[in-house]
Amino acid sequence: MTSFIDEQREAYGVEPICSELPIAPSTYYEQKARQADPSRLPERARRDAALCEQINRVWKQNRRVYGARKIWHQLGRENIPVARCTVERLMRRLGIRGVVRGRKPITTIPDELADRPTDLVERDFTADRPNQLWVADLTYVATWLGFVYVAFVIDVYSRMIVGWRVSRSLRSDLALDALEQALHARSDTDGLIHHSDRGVQYVSIRYTERLAEAGIEPSVGSVGDSYDNAMAESIIGLFKTEVIHRLGPWRNVDHVEIETLIWVDWFNNRRLLEPIGYIPPVEFEEVYYRSQETPAALAGLT
């Protein structure tokens, strides 16, 4: 209403316009004074304005994917006190929102003829330490030049993405390359279990031989179990929601690869994950390793 009066005041004057509208001239002039001098704003309005800046900053810094809950937790980590309902209200005012996850298409094809390892996980996707249980899965991305495929290897303890690869082909090399990256990043494989679905990429001879060579125990989801690889599918769901569905259309494999690289770095080092206490995976693992050092240090003093 103030902007309407601004547009018409030269032709008709403020008081005549206000006499026709449900607004007093004094209210209009006060609004204009507040625009010129924000210190005249009520305390709540000033706080809302400051919080809007912080909310918008957190949203933009985190790839514009955070909803109110994640932004609220991040502000708390930065010692900016605010109620979650306030974050929700101000996000509506700003016209911003988090991304909404969609359904994940099925990409792996089960090999019913190949010998398969047993299911050592049985849908219990928990771990007491890093490098105790990895899960692996892959997905596809439509580009202008055809489909490309993305494979991930994830550490269950922290949800850290320890290996990933992008390829034009769905052959076993894709999954194997992601595994090789994970093995390069994580050399401690003592007692490690690798779990996947029944896709031909993961039960291939080359893949199972590489697991055996690294001393990793293979595990494959049970037949007819829709949750046989739920954690890996959950992470891939985030990837599709936060990258693929937001940033497309995709030109080619290089376009997908560079954006996946950027997302994995953000996911591992800065993204807040609810299951591990709204902290990034790297921070969750650092807490674990510090807790292991403390008893050893105390033992050395005795």
Image (tube, rainbow, N blue to C red):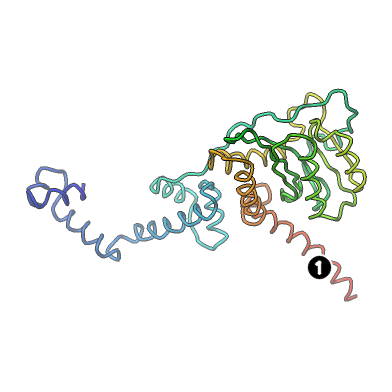
Q: Secondary structure at mark 1?
A: helix
Residue 231 rendering spot, x and y as whole percentages: 72, 39
Q: Residue at x 82, y 34 (%)?
A: 122
**Which residue is at the front of the view, 147 or 92?**
147
Residue 218 position by quadrant = top right
Is 262 on the left-hand or right-hand side of 42? right
Residue nearer the viewer, 280 or 266: 266
Determine whether, in the image, residue 105 is placed left or right of residue 72.
right
Seen in the picture, residue 159 relative to 244 is either above or below; the reply is below
How crowded is the residue under tag 1: few (<14 C-alpha within 10 Å), some, or many (20+)?
few
In this rendering, the answer to whether 46 lies above or below 217 is below
* Position of 236 relative to 274 (above/below): above
Q: Position of residue 61 (x, y in %)?
A: 52, 55
The three-letter code of the residue at mark 1 reads: Thr
**Residue marked by disc 1:** 294
Rendered-image quadrant of the C terminus: bottom right
**Left or right placement of residue 17 versus residue 224 in this view:** left
Q: Position of residue 37 (x, y in %)?
A: 26, 65
